[in-house]
């Protein structure tokens, strides 16, 4: 839970420091939205998922979202790793 708070605090600090730049740089805005998706999937994977299958799917989804966030951070493009394939 502590690392989640750190990530969300860092995201909110970025929003307050760079309010225009967040939305001018599409990759950063996408990354912040995916951070929220990652946190929600993580909470369902760890405790809110009612069935084992749902928790597993949320866990796999959280891993996929995390990997996509990393690819966005490395490429500085909203499509991340898909940029070379789609764009």
Image: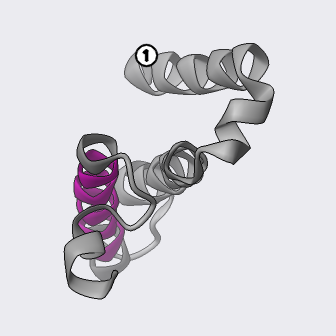
Q: Residue at x 29, y 72 (%)?
A: 83
Magenta span main SS = helix
Q: Residue at x 24, y 53 (%)?
A: 71
Above or below, 70 against 34 in this view is above
Q: Residue at x 46, y 71 (%)?
A: 50
SS of the residue under disc 1: helix
* x and y percentages locating residue 86 in the rendered image: 31, 86
Horizontal relation, residue 18 to residue 7: left or right: right
Which quadrant of the figure has residue 54? bottom left
**Was residue 62 drawn as part of the magenta stretch in this picture?**
yes
* x and y percentages locating residue 6 in the rendered image: 48, 16
Above or below, 18 against 77 in this view is above
Magenta stretch bounds? 57-72
Horizontal relation, residue 27 to residue 46: left or right: right
Q: Residue at x 21, y 83 (%)?
A: 85
**Was residue 82 drawn as part of the magenta stretch in this picture?**
no
* x and y percentages locating residue 51 in the rendered image: 38, 76
- Depth check: 61 or 16 in front? 16
Above or below, 19 against 47 in this view is above
- Depth check: 76 or 65 in front? 76
Query: Residue lying furthest bottom in this view?
Result: 86
Where does the N terminus fall, quadrant-wise?
top left
Where does the C terminus fall, quadrant-wise?
bottom left
Horizontal relation, residue 7 to residue 57: left or right: right
Q: Which residue is mark 1?
A: 2
- Depth check: 80 or 32 in front? 80
Which quadrant of the figure has residue 24? top right
């Amino acid at each position: 839970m502590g690392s989640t708070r750190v990530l969300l605090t860092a995201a909110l600090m970025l929003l307050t420091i760079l309010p225009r730049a967040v939305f001018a740089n599409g990759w950063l805005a996408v990354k912040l939205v995916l951070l929220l998706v990652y946190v929600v999937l993580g909470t369902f994977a760890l405790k809110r998922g009612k069935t084992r299958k749902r928790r597993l799917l949320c866990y796999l989804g959280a891993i996929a979202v995390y990997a996509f966030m990393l690819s966005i951070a490395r490429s500085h493009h909203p499509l991340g790793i898909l940029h070379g394939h789609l764009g």
